[in-house]
Image: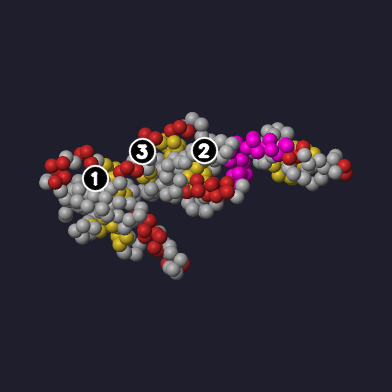
Amino acid sequence: MAPAAVDYPGSPCFEPKISPMVAEENEIGNMMLAGESDVQPPQEQHISKKELTSEEMVTGNERLDKGYLKYGCSHYRRRCRIRAPCCNEIFDCRHCHNEAKNSISIEQKLRHDVPRHLVEKVGMVLFGGYPQVQQICKNCGVCMGRYFCAICKLFDDDTSKEQYHCDGCGICRIGGSNNFFHCNKCGCCYSVLLKSSHPCVERAMHQNCPVCFEYLFESRNDVIALLCGHTIHKSCLEEMKEHYQYACPICSKSVCDMSKVWEKFDVEIAATPMPPYCENKTVWILCNDCGCNSEVKYHVVAHKCPNCKSYNTRQTRGLGR
């Protein structure tokens, strides 16, 4: 979900760079019910540990810091739980809800995701109660999360992730706002290192991974942008590599520099002469890398594109004369 901040695999040995984890939270939601709070909290707010002096942490604001990093789930460290508006049940976070309610043990017609933008109540872990969505509980004075976004309704005590809210994506991402930029055409965030070099593909992240079919924009796993501009999970790309698959599953273009591999094909073809009755046979091929249509000599091993010298080709017409 960055991967949206992503990078490109380009080395001959095919070692794709890892992008920061994409989408921690998405979809815009209303923070508070109108008229229920005199003071509206900011959309995004950090309470860094430096802002709490040692005296405040022990005396005046002892409750503000109470339980810091001691509660939460495998997804977030936080001091509150959410009441899901869809089923009125309590869960540690939306991911916990979605995992439970989309389990194979649940009847298919009852499976669902929590509508995060409709979450209005949270459950306090330390002192109980169900206050409105806000960073600091008005009843007990406990901070529910050092990082808080009123738009995404995201709480997290672990600020080492460097969370930030991207207005363009409409979600919270991690990795630090200074390290990423939002591409309006692609509709997602990329590393600033790619600001002037990435190939724009409209709504590149708003699609399923072509291997595992998880929706990439909301994925919490690392995402990579291929040389062709299409996106895929980093782990799925590594699995493709293990099975010697080096072409984009969407457009079939090479996912990395294959020049060394093509040189080995040259050697293999030179060492494998065709029988006399096939020496003058030709076929038409389409190059997946450059898109060029060409008529070339038939060979049982592979067919080389005369335009870009790639062997990433497919035969489009049968044997000629």
Q: How far separated are the C-alphas under marks 3 and 1?
A: 21 Å
Q: What main secondary structure does the magenta stretch of the protein show?
A: loop
The x, y position of residue 165, in whole percent, is 35, 42
Q: Residue at x 58, y 48 (%)?
A: 242
| Disc 1 versus disc 2: nearer the observer | 2
Mark closest to the chain's N terminus, 2 or 3 = 2
Name the N-terminal-most of marks 3 and 1: 1
Marks 2 and 3, how far apart at CA: 19 Å
Residue 258: percent from the left, percent from the top?
63, 37
**Of marks 1 and 2, which one's residue comes earlier in the chain?**
2
Residue picked out by circle 1: 41
Q: Secondary structure at mark 3?
A: loop
Q: Nearer the viewer, mark 3 or mark 1?
A: 3
Can see residue 264? yes
In this rendering, the answer to whether 34 lies above or below 199 is below
Residue at mark 3: 176
Q: Amino acid at mark 3?
A: Gly
Q: Quadrant of the C terminus?
A: top right
Residue 193 image-quadrant placement: top left
Type of colouring: secondary structure
Q: Which residue is mark 2?
A: 8
SS state under label 2: loop
Residue 135 relative to residue 298: left or right: left
Q: Residue furthest left?
A: 59
Type of the residue with mark 1: Pro
| Picture residue at 50% right of the left edge, 48% below the top | 235
Q: Residues within 10 Å of mark 3 (few under 14, many from 20)?
A: some
117 horizontally vs 244: left or right: left
Which range of residues does the magenta coloring cover?
245-267
